[in-house]
Image: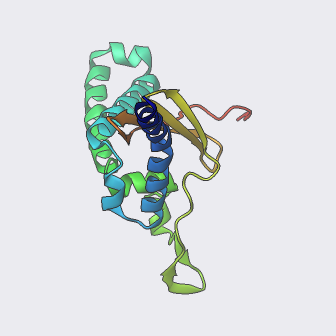
Amino acid sequence: MALALLALLALLGWIAAGPFMTINAIREAIQAQDSAGLSRHVDFPLLRQNLRAQVEDALARRMGPDMLDSPLGGVAMGLANQAAGGMVDAVATPAGIGAILEGRGLLHRIGGGGIDPNDAYAHRPPPDPLHDARYRFESPSRFTATVRTADGAPVVIVLLRQGLHWKLADIRMSSAPPSGRTD
């Protein structure tokens, strides 16, 4: 009986520690710029689906109901969704996820981001993308880590449990201005 209870407690401990170990593995893979290591902790098909849904929703909100009701608006929305789907597919890769979580982008790379100003051949290590993250279990199978971008907007990283392992399944980016800001 005691052995079964001990095994159950060990299993619950493993499940409870799992998202923290996954977050740490993601952090280390990003800092080491290890795409293969990062890909072990990401459910890419589900992530693409979730990111695509966010982009399509944001496009529909920007177009507004009047534009969507017109025939030309429907065609424009279809074209915009196809273009956005291609962008999501390009971003939902190990390198793209690392760039998102690090706060890097194309302009950052073009502008020489990461290059040490004192030594052009040396690169500064990428920043810790999960520094000051707020962690939360939303259910026994869903865990979130919320970080803030440089301008204060929240980015929610969602991990889902798949068996005994946790994987990154969604990155929710706020399209609204951060609370407390008046623009």
Q: Position of residue 108 (x, y in %)?
A: 49, 63
Is residue 129 found left or right of 12 in the rendered image? Answer: right
84 is higher (above) or lower (below) than 72? below
Total number of numbered labels? 0
Res. 177 image quadrant: top right
Is residue 123 found left or right of 165 in the rendered image? Answer: right
Q: For the point 40% across and 26% down, which residue is it?
A: 57
62 is higher (above) or lower (below) than 86? above
State which quarter of the image contains the N terminus. Answer: top left
Q: Position of residue 9 (x, y in %)?
A: 48, 34
Q: For the point 70% across and 35% down, which residue is it?
A: 183
Residue 131 can be seen, yes or no: yes
Q: Position of residue 98 (x, y in %)?
A: 42, 56
Is residue 67 found left or right of 21 in the rendered image? Answer: left
86 is higher (above) or lower (below) than 31? above
Q: Position of residue 134 (x, y in %)?
A: 62, 40
Res. 174 image quadrant: top right
* Residue in the foreground of this view, choosing between 120 and 136: 136
Residue 171 can be seen, yes or no: no
* Residue in the foreground of this view, choosing between 35 and 92: 35
* Residue in the foreground of this view, choosing between 37 and 57: 37
Q: For the point 35% across and 29% down, which residue is it?
A: 53
Q: How is the image coloured?
A: rainbow
